Amino acid sequence: MKLLYICFILIILIISLYNGVEARFKTPIGKKIDRMIRDLHGEVPVFSNESLIFEQKVDHYDYFNNNTFKQRYIVVDDYFTGDGPIFFYLAGEAPMGFFGFQEVQVVNWAQDFGALFIVLEHRYYGESYPVDDLSTHNLKYLTSQQALSDAANFLSTYKQDNNLIDNQVVVFGCSYSGALSAWFRLKYPNLVVASVAPSGPVLAQLNYTGYYAQFSNSAQADCVAATQQATNEIMKLIANESGRKQLEKTFNSCHSLDDPRDQYYFLYSITDALGGSDQMNNPPTWILNSTCQMLLQNTNYVNNWAQIVNVGQTQCNDFRLKSFIEQLRDISINDNSDNRMWTYQTCVEFGYFSTAYPGTSVFPPVLNVEEQTKWCEEIYDIPGMTPNIDATNNYYGGQNIQGSNIMFTNGLLDPWHLLSVNEDNQAGTVKAVTYEAGHCGSLIATTNDDPISLTNARQEVLSFLKLVLSQ
Ligand SMILES: *[C@@H]1O[C@H](CO)[C@@H](O)[C@H](O)[C@H]1NC(C)=O
Ligand SMILES: *[C@@H]1O[C@H](CO)[C@@H](O)[C@H](O)[C@H]1NC(C)=O
Ligand SMILES: *[C@@H]1O[C@H](CO)[C@@H](O)[C@H](O)[C@H]1NC(C)=O
Ligand SMILES: *[C@@H]1O[C@H](CO)[C@@H](O)[C@H](O)[C@H]1NC(C)=O
Ligand SMILES: *[C@@H]1O[C@H](CO)[C@@H](O)[C@H](O)[C@H]1NC(C)=O
Protein backbone atom coordinates (compact mmCIF):
# COMPACT_ATOMS: atom_id res chain seq x y z
CA MET A 1 0.00 0.00 0.00
CA LYS A 2 2.77 2.38 1.00
CA LEU A 3 4.75 1.46 -2.12
CA LEU A 4 1.71 2.04 -4.30
CA TYR A 5 1.27 5.44 -2.74
CA ILE A 6 4.91 6.35 -3.36
CA CYS A 7 4.60 5.22 -6.99
CA PHE A 8 1.50 7.34 -7.36
CA ILE A 9 3.21 10.41 -5.91
CA LEU A 10 6.21 9.77 -8.16
CA ILE A 11 4.11 9.66 -11.30
CA ILE A 12 2.24 12.75 -10.24
CA LEU A 13 5.48 14.57 -9.64
CA ILE A 14 6.92 13.50 -12.96
CA ILE A 15 3.87 15.00 -14.60
CA SER A 16 4.12 18.05 -12.40
CA LEU A 17 7.64 18.70 -13.52
CA TYR A 18 6.52 18.65 -17.10
CA ASN A 19 5.77 22.25 -17.81
CA GLY A 20 4.99 21.93 -21.46
CA VAL A 21 7.75 22.19 -23.99
CA GLU A 22 6.79 25.79 -24.11
CA ALA A 23 8.23 26.46 -20.69
CA ARG A 24 11.08 28.72 -21.65
CA PHE A 25 14.60 27.32 -21.68
CA LYS A 26 14.32 23.62 -20.98
CA THR A 27 16.68 22.32 -18.31
CA PRO A 28 18.11 18.81 -18.75
CA ILE A 29 15.88 17.76 -15.88
CA GLY A 30 12.92 19.05 -17.81
CA LYS A 31 14.11 17.33 -20.98
CA LYS A 32 14.40 13.95 -19.34
CA ILE A 33 10.91 14.34 -18.00
CA ASP A 34 9.63 15.28 -21.45
CA ARG A 35 10.71 11.89 -22.70
CA MET A 36 9.01 10.14 -19.80
CA ILE A 37 5.86 12.11 -20.43
CA ARG A 38 5.97 11.13 -24.06
CA ASP A 39 5.94 7.52 -22.86
CA LEU A 40 3.29 8.20 -20.25
CA HIS A 41 1.01 9.72 -22.82
CA GLY A 42 2.02 7.20 -25.46
CA GLU A 43 -1.44 5.76 -25.79
CA VAL A 44 -3.31 9.02 -25.96
CA PRO A 45 -1.97 10.49 -29.22
CA VAL A 46 -4.54 9.73 -31.83
CA PHE A 47 -3.96 8.13 -35.18
CA SER A 48 -0.33 9.26 -35.45
CA ASN A 49 0.64 6.04 -37.21
CA GLU A 50 -1.42 7.07 -40.19
CA SER A 51 0.38 10.27 -41.02
CA LEU A 52 0.37 11.62 -44.55
CA ILE A 53 2.80 13.91 -46.36
CA PHE A 54 2.20 17.33 -47.91
CA GLU A 55 4.78 18.92 -50.22
CA GLN A 56 5.15 22.29 -48.52
CA LYS A 57 7.00 25.40 -49.66
CA VAL A 58 10.19 26.04 -47.68
CA ASP A 59 9.86 29.82 -47.97
CA HIS A 60 6.47 31.42 -48.52
CA TYR A 61 7.98 34.87 -48.85
CA ASP A 62 10.61 34.37 -51.54
CA TYR A 63 9.20 34.15 -55.03
CA PHE A 64 12.53 32.84 -56.30
CA ASN A 65 12.72 29.93 -53.91
CA ASN A 66 10.62 27.04 -55.13
CA ASN A 67 12.09 24.44 -52.78
CA THR A 68 9.70 22.19 -50.91
CA PHE A 69 9.84 19.90 -47.88
CA LYS A 70 7.72 17.07 -46.56
CA GLN A 71 5.24 18.21 -43.92
CA ARG A 72 3.32 15.58 -41.98
CA TYR A 73 -0.38 15.65 -41.28
CA ILE A 74 -3.14 13.35 -40.07
CA VAL A 75 -6.69 13.08 -41.32
CA VAL A 76 -9.38 11.42 -39.24
CA ASP A 77 -12.55 10.92 -41.27
CA ASP A 78 -14.29 8.47 -38.94
CA TYR A 79 -16.95 11.03 -37.97
CA PHE A 80 -17.11 13.04 -41.17
CA THR A 81 -20.53 13.34 -42.76
CA GLY A 82 -19.30 14.81 -46.04
CA ASP A 83 -20.95 18.18 -45.62
CA GLY A 84 -19.83 18.69 -42.01
CA PRO A 85 -17.14 21.19 -41.02
CA ILE A 86 -13.38 20.67 -40.88
CA PHE A 87 -11.70 20.91 -37.47
CA PHE A 88 -8.15 21.90 -38.24
CA TYR A 89 -5.73 21.39 -35.35
CA LEU A 90 -2.35 23.10 -35.51
CA ALA A 91 0.31 21.05 -33.74
CA GLY A 92 2.84 23.07 -31.78
CA GLU A 93 6.47 22.92 -30.69
CA ALA A 94 6.86 19.13 -30.61
CA PRO A 95 6.30 16.14 -32.87
CA MET A 96 2.69 15.87 -33.97
CA GLY A 97 1.00 13.46 -31.58
CA PHE A 98 3.13 14.52 -28.62
CA PHE A 99 0.33 16.75 -27.46
CA GLY A 100 -2.37 14.25 -28.38
CA PHE A 101 -3.78 14.45 -24.88
CA GLN A 102 -4.64 18.07 -25.65
CA GLU A 103 -6.79 17.06 -28.63
CA VAL A 104 -9.21 14.83 -26.79
CA GLN A 105 -12.11 17.30 -26.63
CA VAL A 106 -11.58 18.47 -30.20
CA VAL A 107 -12.02 14.88 -31.36
CA ASN A 108 -15.18 14.66 -29.22
CA TRP A 109 -16.51 17.83 -30.79
CA ALA A 110 -15.62 16.54 -34.25
CA GLN A 111 -17.87 13.61 -33.45
CA ASP A 112 -20.69 15.93 -32.34
CA PHE A 113 -20.51 17.99 -35.51
CA GLY A 114 -19.74 15.23 -38.02
CA ALA A 115 -16.48 17.03 -38.69
CA LEU A 116 -13.36 16.03 -40.53
CA PHE A 117 -10.44 16.24 -38.06
CA ILE A 118 -7.04 17.24 -39.46
CA VAL A 119 -3.78 17.79 -37.56
CA LEU A 120 -0.87 19.56 -39.25
CA GLU A 121 2.65 19.17 -37.85
CA HIS A 122 4.57 22.42 -37.27
CA ARG A 123 7.62 22.95 -39.48
CA TYR A 124 10.95 22.10 -37.78
CA TYR A 125 9.33 19.62 -35.39
CA GLY A 126 8.71 15.88 -35.49
CA GLU A 127 9.51 14.80 -39.03
CA SER A 128 8.69 18.05 -40.83
CA TYR A 129 12.13 19.57 -41.31
CA PRO A 130 12.68 21.90 -44.26
CA VAL A 131 16.47 21.67 -43.81
CA ASP A 132 19.11 18.93 -43.43
CA ASP A 133 20.73 20.21 -40.27
CA LEU A 134 19.83 22.73 -37.61
CA SER A 135 22.74 25.14 -37.94
CA THR A 136 21.69 28.66 -37.07
CA HIS A 137 21.63 29.82 -40.68
CA ASN A 138 19.22 27.00 -41.49
CA LEU A 139 16.75 28.20 -38.86
CA LYS A 140 15.84 31.29 -40.84
CA TYR A 141 12.62 29.64 -42.06
CA LEU A 142 11.51 28.93 -38.50
CA THR A 143 9.03 31.72 -37.79
CA SER A 144 5.41 31.79 -36.71
CA GLN A 145 4.58 33.62 -39.94
CA GLN A 146 5.99 30.83 -42.10
CA ALA A 147 4.07 28.34 -39.93
CA LEU A 148 0.81 30.22 -40.51
CA SER A 149 1.51 30.33 -44.23
CA ASP A 150 2.13 26.56 -44.14
CA ALA A 151 -1.30 26.13 -42.60
CA ALA A 152 -2.91 28.40 -45.20
CA ASN A 153 -1.23 26.71 -48.15
CA PHE A 154 -1.98 23.25 -46.80
CA LEU A 155 -5.61 24.01 -46.01
CA SER A 156 -6.53 25.64 -49.30
CA THR A 157 -4.73 22.96 -51.32
CA TYR A 158 -6.28 20.13 -49.32
CA LYS A 159 -9.78 21.54 -49.71
CA GLN A 160 -9.33 21.95 -53.44
CA ASP A 161 -7.85 18.51 -53.97
CA ASN A 162 -10.62 16.84 -51.98
CA ASN A 163 -13.63 18.77 -53.22
CA LEU A 164 -14.22 20.36 -49.83
CA ILE A 165 -14.31 23.98 -50.97
CA ASP A 166 -17.67 24.69 -49.33
CA ASN A 167 -16.95 23.04 -45.98
CA GLN A 168 -16.49 25.51 -43.14
CA VAL A 169 -13.26 25.29 -41.17
CA VAL A 170 -12.58 25.99 -37.48
CA VAL A 171 -8.94 26.18 -36.40
CA PHE A 172 -7.73 24.84 -33.04
CA GLY A 173 -4.48 24.58 -31.11
CA CYS A 174 -3.26 24.87 -27.55
CA SER A 175 -0.49 26.79 -25.77
CA TYR A 176 1.87 28.17 -28.46
CA SER A 177 -0.32 26.58 -31.11
CA GLY A 178 -3.33 28.12 -29.32
CA ALA A 179 -1.78 31.49 -30.11
CA LEU A 180 -1.16 30.30 -33.67
CA SER A 181 -4.82 29.32 -33.89
CA ALA A 182 -5.95 32.84 -32.91
CA TRP A 183 -3.42 34.41 -35.29
CA PHE A 184 -4.57 32.15 -38.12
CA ARG A 185 -8.12 33.45 -37.87
CA LEU A 186 -6.74 37.01 -37.53
CA LYS A 187 -4.58 36.78 -40.66
CA TYR A 188 -6.64 34.35 -42.78
CA PRO A 189 -10.30 35.09 -42.00
CA ASN A 190 -11.13 33.98 -45.52
CA LEU A 191 -9.96 30.42 -44.80
CA VAL A 192 -11.51 29.69 -41.38
CA VAL A 193 -14.80 30.83 -39.87
CA ALA A 194 -13.52 30.76 -36.29
CA SER A 195 -10.67 29.97 -33.93
CA VAL A 196 -10.59 28.20 -30.58
CA ALA A 197 -7.41 29.31 -28.82
CA PRO A 198 -6.85 27.62 -25.45
CA SER A 199 -3.97 28.91 -23.27
CA GLY A 200 -2.44 30.88 -26.12
CA PRO A 201 0.20 33.39 -24.93
CA VAL A 202 -0.47 35.98 -27.61
CA LEU A 203 1.56 38.68 -25.84
CA ALA A 204 5.28 38.35 -26.44
CA GLN A 205 7.25 39.45 -23.37
CA LEU A 206 10.97 39.53 -22.72
CA ASN A 207 11.07 39.83 -18.94
CA TYR A 208 8.31 37.46 -17.88
CA THR A 209 8.30 37.90 -14.09
CA GLY A 210 4.64 36.82 -14.07
CA TYR A 211 5.52 33.19 -14.65
CA TYR A 212 6.86 32.72 -11.12
CA ALA A 213 4.72 35.46 -9.59
CA GLN A 214 1.67 33.35 -10.44
CA PHE A 215 2.84 30.62 -8.05
CA SER A 216 1.93 32.84 -5.08
CA ASN A 217 -1.64 33.10 -6.38
CA SER A 218 -2.02 29.46 -7.42
CA ALA A 219 -0.48 27.64 -4.45
CA GLN A 220 -1.88 27.52 -0.91
CA ALA A 221 -0.49 30.12 1.49
CA ASP A 222 1.49 27.59 3.54
CA CYS A 223 3.21 26.29 0.42
CA VAL A 224 4.06 29.81 -0.70
CA ALA A 225 5.48 30.68 2.72
CA ALA A 226 7.55 27.47 2.85
CA THR A 227 8.95 28.23 -0.60
CA GLN A 228 9.93 31.75 0.48
CA GLN A 229 11.64 30.36 3.56
CA ALA A 230 13.52 27.76 1.54
CA THR A 231 14.57 30.37 -1.00
CA ASN A 232 15.98 32.60 1.75
CA GLU A 233 17.94 29.68 3.12
CA ILE A 234 19.28 28.64 -0.27
CA MET A 235 20.39 32.21 -1.03
CA LYS A 236 22.32 32.26 2.23
CA LEU A 237 23.90 28.87 1.59
CA ILE A 238 24.95 29.63 -1.96
CA ALA A 239 26.83 32.75 -0.81
CA ASN A 240 29.77 30.92 0.77
CA GLU A 241 31.76 27.81 0.14
CA SER A 242 30.61 25.63 3.02
CA GLY A 243 27.00 26.47 2.25
CA ARG A 244 27.54 25.57 -1.40
CA LYS A 245 29.02 22.20 -0.43
CA GLN A 246 25.86 21.55 1.50
CA LEU A 247 23.64 22.50 -1.45
CA GLU A 248 25.70 20.33 -3.81
CA LYS A 249 25.06 17.38 -1.56
CA THR A 250 21.38 18.06 -0.93
CA PHE A 251 20.57 18.63 -4.60
CA ASN A 252 22.80 15.75 -5.75
CA SER A 253 24.94 17.96 -7.97
CA CYS A 254 27.66 16.20 -9.99
CA HIS A 255 29.94 19.24 -9.81
CA SER A 256 30.86 22.17 -7.62
CA LEU A 257 28.64 25.23 -7.70
CA ASP A 258 31.52 27.70 -7.39
CA ASP A 259 31.11 29.33 -10.80
CA PRO A 260 28.57 32.19 -10.60
CA ARG A 261 26.98 31.23 -13.92
CA ASP A 262 26.55 27.65 -12.71
CA GLN A 263 24.94 29.10 -9.59
CA TYR A 264 22.48 30.97 -11.79
CA TYR A 265 21.72 27.84 -13.77
CA PHE A 266 21.35 25.80 -10.59
CA LEU A 267 18.85 28.31 -9.17
CA TYR A 268 17.09 28.50 -12.52
CA SER A 269 16.73 24.68 -12.67
CA ILE A 270 15.43 24.18 -9.17
CA THR A 271 13.03 27.11 -9.58
CA ASP A 272 11.70 25.55 -12.77
CA ALA A 273 10.99 22.28 -10.94
CA LEU A 274 8.91 23.81 -8.15
CA GLY A 275 7.78 27.16 -9.53
CA GLY A 276 6.39 25.71 -12.74
CA SER A 277 4.19 23.12 -11.08
CA ASP A 278 1.11 25.34 -11.24
CA GLN A 279 1.14 25.34 -15.04
CA MET A 280 -0.15 21.80 -15.52
CA ASN A 281 -2.36 21.85 -12.43
CA ASN A 282 -5.27 20.01 -14.02
CA PRO A 283 -7.65 17.31 -12.83
CA PRO A 284 -7.45 14.53 -11.90
CA THR A 285 -3.82 14.77 -10.70
CA TRP A 286 -3.79 18.37 -9.40
CA ILE A 287 -0.02 18.26 -9.45
CA LEU A 288 0.51 21.59 -7.74
CA ASN A 289 -1.19 20.14 -4.69
CA SER A 290 0.94 17.01 -4.63
CA THR A 291 4.11 19.03 -5.21
CA CYS A 292 3.20 21.27 -2.29
CA GLN A 293 2.43 18.20 -0.21
CA MET A 294 5.95 17.01 -0.84
CA LEU A 295 7.41 20.41 0.05
CA LEU A 296 5.42 20.50 3.28
CA GLN A 297 6.01 16.87 4.36
CA ASN A 298 8.30 18.20 7.15
CA THR A 299 9.94 21.53 7.96
CA ASN A 300 13.22 20.80 6.15
CA TYR A 301 11.94 22.66 3.11
CA VAL A 302 15.29 22.85 1.33
CA ASN A 303 15.61 19.08 1.52
CA ASN A 304 12.06 18.60 0.33
CA TRP A 305 12.62 20.95 -2.58
CA ALA A 306 15.62 18.83 -3.55
CA GLN A 307 13.39 15.75 -3.47
CA ILE A 308 11.05 17.45 -5.93
CA VAL A 309 14.02 18.23 -8.20
CA ASN A 310 15.31 14.67 -7.95
CA VAL A 311 12.10 12.85 -8.78
CA GLY A 312 12.80 10.51 -11.67
CA GLN A 313 16.55 11.25 -11.60
CA THR A 314 18.71 8.14 -11.43
CA GLN A 315 22.01 10.01 -11.66
CA CYS A 316 23.49 13.14 -10.17
CA ASN A 317 22.38 16.47 -11.63
CA ASP A 318 24.60 18.37 -14.04
CA PHE A 319 24.02 22.02 -13.11
CA ARG A 320 26.89 23.35 -15.25
CA LEU A 321 25.62 26.03 -17.60
CA LYS A 322 28.20 24.88 -20.14
CA SER A 323 26.55 21.45 -20.45
CA PHE A 324 23.13 22.99 -20.88
CA ILE A 325 24.34 25.35 -23.61
CA GLU A 326 26.28 22.55 -25.34
CA GLN A 327 23.15 20.42 -25.62
CA LEU A 328 21.23 23.24 -27.23
CA ARG A 329 24.07 23.89 -29.68
CA ASP A 330 23.70 20.42 -31.20
CA ILE A 331 22.77 20.99 -34.86
CA SER A 332 21.95 17.39 -35.71
CA ILE A 333 18.34 16.31 -36.00
CA ASN A 334 17.46 13.99 -33.13
CA ASP A 335 14.91 13.38 -30.38
CA ASN A 336 16.03 16.47 -28.47
CA SER A 337 15.91 18.89 -31.38
CA ASP A 338 12.60 20.45 -30.37
CA ASN A 339 14.39 22.11 -27.46
CA ARG A 340 16.84 23.83 -29.81
CA MET A 341 13.92 24.75 -32.10
CA TRP A 342 11.59 26.13 -29.46
CA THR A 343 14.39 28.00 -27.73
CA TYR A 344 15.21 29.59 -31.08
CA GLN A 345 11.61 30.72 -31.47
CA THR A 346 11.70 32.33 -28.04
CA CYS A 347 15.08 33.94 -28.74
CA VAL A 348 13.79 35.43 -32.00
CA GLU A 349 10.09 36.18 -31.60
CA PHE A 350 8.63 35.71 -28.13
CA GLY A 351 11.04 35.97 -25.21
CA TYR A 352 8.90 34.48 -22.43
CA PHE A 353 12.06 34.37 -20.28
CA SER A 354 10.92 33.47 -16.78
CA THR A 355 12.73 35.77 -14.39
CA ALA A 356 12.71 36.59 -10.68
CA TYR A 357 13.71 39.86 -8.98
CA PRO A 358 13.41 41.10 -5.41
CA GLY A 359 9.72 41.25 -4.61
CA THR A 360 8.43 39.71 -7.85
CA SER A 361 8.01 36.17 -6.52
CA VAL A 362 9.06 33.78 -3.74
CA PHE A 363 11.87 32.36 -5.88
CA PRO A 364 15.59 33.29 -5.95
CA PRO A 365 15.50 37.02 -6.76
CA VAL A 366 18.59 36.84 -8.96
CA LEU A 367 17.13 35.27 -12.11
CA ASN A 368 17.66 38.34 -14.26
CA VAL A 369 16.70 38.55 -17.90
CA GLU A 370 20.16 39.60 -19.10
CA GLU A 371 21.65 36.19 -18.34
CA GLN A 372 18.95 34.36 -20.27
CA THR A 373 19.33 36.69 -23.24
CA LYS A 374 23.03 35.87 -23.18
CA TRP A 375 22.15 32.18 -23.51
CA CYS A 376 20.53 33.00 -26.86
CA GLU A 377 23.78 34.54 -28.10
CA GLU A 378 25.79 31.56 -26.96
CA ILE A 379 23.47 28.87 -28.28
CA TYR A 380 23.08 30.39 -31.76
CA ASP A 381 26.41 32.24 -32.02
CA ILE A 382 24.73 35.56 -32.72
CA PRO A 383 26.30 38.42 -30.77
CA GLY A 384 23.67 40.79 -29.41
CA MET A 385 20.84 38.39 -30.18
CA THR A 386 17.60 39.45 -28.50
CA PRO A 387 13.95 38.68 -29.35
CA ASN A 388 12.02 41.11 -31.55
CA ILE A 389 9.29 41.51 -28.96
CA ASP A 390 7.88 44.77 -30.34
CA ALA A 391 7.78 43.49 -33.90
CA THR A 392 5.86 40.40 -32.78
CA ASN A 393 3.33 42.41 -30.80
CA ASN A 394 2.96 44.98 -33.58
CA TYR A 395 2.32 42.24 -36.07
CA TYR A 396 -0.26 40.25 -34.06
CA GLY A 397 -1.62 42.88 -31.69
CA GLY A 398 -0.70 41.23 -28.39
CA GLN A 399 -3.61 41.02 -25.96
CA ASN A 400 -5.43 43.62 -28.04
CA ILE A 401 -5.75 41.14 -30.89
CA GLN A 402 -8.30 42.23 -33.50
CA GLY A 403 -10.34 39.93 -35.66
CA SER A 404 -13.53 38.08 -34.89
CA ASN A 405 -14.91 34.69 -33.95
CA ILE A 406 -11.91 33.95 -31.76
CA MET A 407 -12.47 32.24 -28.43
CA PHE A 408 -9.70 32.07 -25.84
CA THR A 409 -9.90 29.69 -22.89
CA ASN A 410 -7.52 29.97 -19.96
CA GLY A 411 -6.87 28.29 -16.63
CA LEU A 412 -6.50 30.87 -13.90
CA LEU A 413 -3.96 28.69 -12.05
CA ASP A 414 -1.73 28.57 -15.14
CA PRO A 415 0.90 31.35 -15.41
CA TRP A 416 0.44 31.54 -19.17
CA HIS A 417 -3.03 33.05 -18.77
CA LEU A 418 -1.20 36.28 -17.89
CA LEU A 419 0.02 36.57 -21.49
CA SER A 420 -3.30 35.52 -23.02
CA VAL A 421 -6.74 37.09 -23.34
CA ASN A 422 -9.02 36.68 -20.33
CA GLU A 423 -11.86 39.08 -21.09
CA ASP A 424 -14.15 39.57 -24.08
CA ASN A 425 -13.18 42.58 -26.14
CA GLN A 426 -15.57 45.49 -26.24
CA ALA A 427 -17.03 44.63 -29.60
CA GLY A 428 -17.67 41.07 -28.42
CA THR A 429 -15.80 39.71 -31.42
CA VAL A 430 -13.00 38.18 -29.33
CA LYS A 431 -14.33 35.98 -26.53
CA ALA A 432 -12.62 34.78 -23.38
CA VAL A 433 -13.55 32.01 -20.99
CA THR A 434 -11.63 31.22 -17.81
CA TYR A 435 -11.77 28.30 -15.38
CA GLU A 436 -10.08 27.15 -12.16
CA ALA A 437 -7.41 24.75 -13.42
CA GLY A 438 -4.25 24.74 -15.52
CA HIS A 439 -2.79 24.85 -19.02
CA CYS A 440 -4.95 23.57 -21.89
CA GLY A 441 -7.45 22.18 -19.38
CA SER A 442 -10.41 22.82 -21.68
CA LEU A 443 -9.13 20.34 -24.27
CA ILE A 444 -8.00 17.41 -22.13
CA ALA A 445 -10.13 14.43 -21.20
CA THR A 446 -13.08 14.94 -18.88
CA THR A 447 -12.70 13.57 -15.34
CA ASN A 448 -15.02 13.13 -12.35
CA ASP A 449 -12.91 15.70 -10.57
CA ASP A 450 -13.48 18.56 -13.02
CA PRO A 451 -14.41 21.84 -11.32
CA ILE A 452 -17.70 23.27 -12.49
CA SER A 453 -15.90 26.23 -14.07
CA LEU A 454 -13.98 23.84 -16.33
CA THR A 455 -17.11 21.95 -17.33
CA ASN A 456 -18.75 25.29 -18.09
CA ALA A 457 -15.76 26.43 -20.15
CA ARG A 458 -16.06 23.35 -22.39
CA GLN A 459 -19.78 24.00 -22.68
CA GLU A 460 -19.08 27.56 -23.80
CA VAL A 461 -16.72 26.34 -26.49
CA LEU A 462 -19.41 23.97 -27.69
CA SER A 463 -21.99 26.80 -27.83
CA PHE A 464 -19.46 28.97 -29.64
CA LEU A 465 -18.91 26.24 -32.23
CA LYS A 466 -22.65 25.88 -32.73
CA LEU A 467 -22.99 29.59 -33.21
CA VAL A 468 -20.13 30.15 -35.66
CA LEU A 469 -21.01 27.07 -37.69
CA SER A 470 -24.60 28.19 -38.11
CA GLN A 471 -23.64 31.59 -39.49
C1 LIG B 1 -2.76 2.48 -36.60
O1 LIG B 1 -2.92 1.98 -35.29
C2 LIG B 1 -4.21 1.47 -35.01
C3 LIG B 1 -4.28 1.12 -33.55
O2 LIG B 1 -3.12 0.48 -33.13
C4 LIG B 1 -4.50 0.29 -35.94
O3 LIG B 1 -5.80 -0.19 -35.69
C5 LIG B 1 -4.38 0.76 -37.37
O4 LIG B 1 -4.56 -0.35 -38.23
C6 LIG B 1 -3.03 1.38 -37.63
N1 LIG B 1 -3.02 1.95 -38.96
C7 LIG B 1 -1.98 1.84 -39.79
C8 LIG B 1 -2.11 2.50 -41.13
O5 LIG B 1 -0.97 1.24 -39.50
C1 LIG C 1 8.20 28.24 -59.28
O1 LIG C 1 7.25 27.24 -59.63
C2 LIG C 1 6.15 27.73 -60.38
C3 LIG C 1 5.15 26.62 -60.53
O2 LIG C 1 5.76 25.45 -60.95
C4 LIG C 1 6.65 28.25 -61.74
O3 LIG C 1 5.57 28.78 -62.48
C5 LIG C 1 7.66 29.34 -61.45
O4 LIG C 1 8.23 29.77 -62.68
C6 LIG C 1 8.78 28.87 -60.54
N1 LIG C 1 9.57 30.02 -60.14
C7 LIG C 1 10.88 29.99 -60.14
C8 LIG C 1 11.54 31.26 -59.72
O5 LIG C 1 11.52 29.01 -60.43
C1 LIG D 1 12.71 43.10 -15.48
O1 LIG D 1 11.68 43.24 -14.53
C2 LIG D 1 12.13 43.62 -13.23
C3 LIG D 1 10.94 43.60 -12.29
O2 LIG D 1 9.91 44.37 -12.75
C4 LIG D 1 12.81 44.98 -13.30
O3 LIG D 1 13.28 45.31 -12.05
C5 LIG D 1 13.96 44.89 -14.31
O4 LIG D 1 14.55 46.15 -14.45
C6 LIG D 1 13.46 44.42 -15.64
N1 LIG D 1 14.59 44.27 -16.55
C7 LIG D 1 14.53 44.63 -17.82
C8 LIG D 1 15.76 44.47 -18.62
O5 LIG D 1 13.53 45.06 -18.32
C1 LIG E 1 28.32 30.35 5.40
O1 LIG E 1 26.92 30.49 5.36
C2 LIG E 1 26.25 29.74 6.33
C3 LIG E 1 24.77 29.87 6.06
O2 LIG E 1 24.39 31.21 5.99
C4 LIG E 1 26.63 30.23 7.71
O3 LIG E 1 25.99 29.45 8.69
C5 LIG E 1 28.13 30.12 7.86
O4 LIG E 1 28.54 30.70 9.08
C6 LIG E 1 28.86 30.81 6.72
N1 LIG E 1 30.27 30.50 6.79
C7 LIG E 1 31.20 31.41 6.58
C8 LIG E 1 32.61 30.92 6.65
O5 LIG E 1 30.94 32.57 6.34
C1 LIG F 1 -5.50 21.55 -2.94
O1 LIG F 1 -5.11 21.61 -1.60
C2 LIG F 1 -5.87 22.49 -0.84
C3 LIG F 1 -5.34 22.52 0.59
O2 LIG F 1 -4.11 21.93 0.70
C4 LIG F 1 -7.33 22.09 -0.82
O3 LIG F 1 -8.08 23.05 -0.13
C5 LIG F 1 -7.82 22.01 -2.25
O4 LIG F 1 -9.14 21.53 -2.27
C6 LIG F 1 -6.94 21.11 -3.04
N1 LIG F 1 -7.39 21.15 -4.41
C7 LIG F 1 -7.62 20.07 -5.09
C8 LIG F 1 -8.16 20.29 -6.44
O5 LIG F 1 -7.41 18.96 -4.65
Image (tube, rainbow, N blue to C red):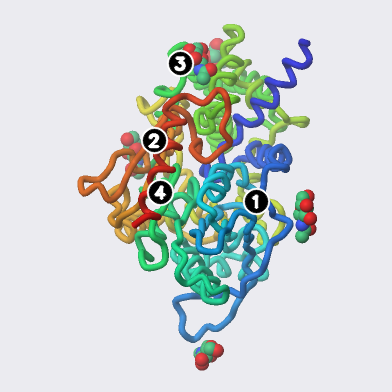
Q: Position of residue 416 (x, y in %)?
A: 43, 39
SS state under label 1? loop
Callout 4 amino acid: Lys
Q: Please name the residue shown 58% across and 43% down the image.
A: 104
For the residues bearing labels 1 and 3, Cβ distance under 8 angstroms: no
Q: On the image, numbered disc 3 is attached to which residue? A: 220
SS state under label 2? loop
Q: On the image, numbered disc 1 is attached to which residue? A: 97
| Rendered-image quadrant of the C terminus | bottom left
Q: Residue furthest left?
A: 426
Measure the C-alpha gap from mark 4 to mark 2.
38 Å
Measure the C-alpha gap from mark 1 to mark 3.
34 Å
Q: Quadrant of residue 260?
A: top right
Q: Return the residue nearer the eye: 35 or 107.
A: 107
Closer to the chain start, of discs 1 and 4, is 1
Closer to the chain start, of discs 4 and 3, is 3
Q: Nearer the viewer, mark 3 or mark 2?
A: 3
Task: Give the left or right position of residue 5, taking residue 418 as reference.
Answer: right
Q: Nearer the viewer, mark 1 or mark 3?
A: 1
Query: Can residue 226 be seen in the rendering of this structure?
Result: no
For label 4, the crowd category at 10 Å Cα-Cα, with few meaning under 14, some 14 to 19 and many 20 or more, is few
Q: On the image, numbered disc 2 is attached to which residue? A: 209
Q: Quadrant of residue 294?
A: top right
**Disc 2 residue: CB within 8 Å of ligand 3:** yes
The tag on residue 466 is 4
